[in-house]
């Protein structure tokens, strides 16, 4: 069975997208793994399905590159909103349902194949600082944030070690973010993502987790954070009251790369 697909990326985090409205087809984990393979397939950090929704403009389903359906992806959320725009779905602000709940995404600007998209993230009510200073929290996907002096490090080796460590066992293995603080509301970060089992050029839920962890541990007056990932720049804004983080917005680029056909 041949299906049309599109390739999108957000700050270097890249995805295969399928429009599967009005169809019962769903790719298997093996098929997803094959199309995401960077040597034998299209190549991507994950695959997303745009599906029908009864309560929003559309539904987003996200699958890691290794095949299983996964938790929320922030860069993916911006990309699928831009994809929906190209399909003529919704207006400048779109609503969609994902595995972690309802989201809205606002197209702030359009220039050719690239857009700037502001994505509403889920509220965060619990931030746990461990005895060694690492921070655990869930921003739609579970994350561990570690503040470091230098990002010149073996992100894959250490990320894999921490991803399978006892401290992340309650979350079935968190994504791992290594963060260097540059100033008030300014950081650089590198992320190891579970499911991809490698470093990715950016991670939206990781950027969100990093901004909240920075506020919680050392910058209580900060409400806007600029984050430099290896694949591009992101920004996170939020409100904070009584230990609860609300009105969380992740802003960054989304770009349509190409379209093609794949034999599933």
Image (cartoon, rainbow, N blue to C red):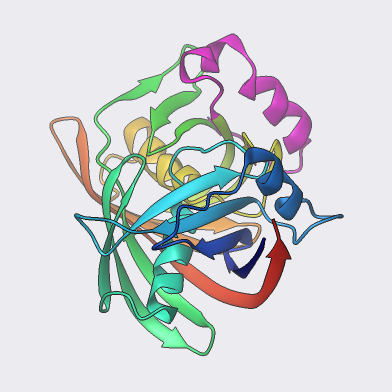
Q: Position of residue 103 (x, y in %)?
A: 27, 54
Q: Residue at x 40, y 39 (%)?
A: 214
- Work out which residue is located at the far left of the displayed protein and give it: 242
Is residue 28 highlighted in magenta? no
Residue 22, by quadrant, is bottom left
Left or right, 7 with respect to 39, comes to left
* Residue range (magenta): 146-174
Q: Position of residue 25 (x, y in %)?
A: 52, 53
The N terminus - image quarter = bottom right
Residue 240, by quadrant, is top left
- Work out which residue is located at the far right of the displayed protein and give it: 39
Q: Position of residue 21 (x, y in %)?
A: 40, 63
Is residue 152 highlighted in magenta? yes
Q: Residue at x 70, y 35 (%)?
A: 197
- Please state which of residues 117 and 38 is positioned toward the viewer in this rendering: 38
- Please state which of residues 202 and 214 is positioned toward the viewer in this rendering: 202
Determine if residue 226 is in view: no
Q: Residue at x 62, y 42 (%)?
A: 28
The C terminus - image quarter = bottom right
- Please state which of residues 81 and 182 is positioned toward the viewer in this rendering: 81
Left or right, 247 with respect to 227, comes to left
Q: Is residue 234 above or below residue 171?
A: below
């Amino acid at each position: 069975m041949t299906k049309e697909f599109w390739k999108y990326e957000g700050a270097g985090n890249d995805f295969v997208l399928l429009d599967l409205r009005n169809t019962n087809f769903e790719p298997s984990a093996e098929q997803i793994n094959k199309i995401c393979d960077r040597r034998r397939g299209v190549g991507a950090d994950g695959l997303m399905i745009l599906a029908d929704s009864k309560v929003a403009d559309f539904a987003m389903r996200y699958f890691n590159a290794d095949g299983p359906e996964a938790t929320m992806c922030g860069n993916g959320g911006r990309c699928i909103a831009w994809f929906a725009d190209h399909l003529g779905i919704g207006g400048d602000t779109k609503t969609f349902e994902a595995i972690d709940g309802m989201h809205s995404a606002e197209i702030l600007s359009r220039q050719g194949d690239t857009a700037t998209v502001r994505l509403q993230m889920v509220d965060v009510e619990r931030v746990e600082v461990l005895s060694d200073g690492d921070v655990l929290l869930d921003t739609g996907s579970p994350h561990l944030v570690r503040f470091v002096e230098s990002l010149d490090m073996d992100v894959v080796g250490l990320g894999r070690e921490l991803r399978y460590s006892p401290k992340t066992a309650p979350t079935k293995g968190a994504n791992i973010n290594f963060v260097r603080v540059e100033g008030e509301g300014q950081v650089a970060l590198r992320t190891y993502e579970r499911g991809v089992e490698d470093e990715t050029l950016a991670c939206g839920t990781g950027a969100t987790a990093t901004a909240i962890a920075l506020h919680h541990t050392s910058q209580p007056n900060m409400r806007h954070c600029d984050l430099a990932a290896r694949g591009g720049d992101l920004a996170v804004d939020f409100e904070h009251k009584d230990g609860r983080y609300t009105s969380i917005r992740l802003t960054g680029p989304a770009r349509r790369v190409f379209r093609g056909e794949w034999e599933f």
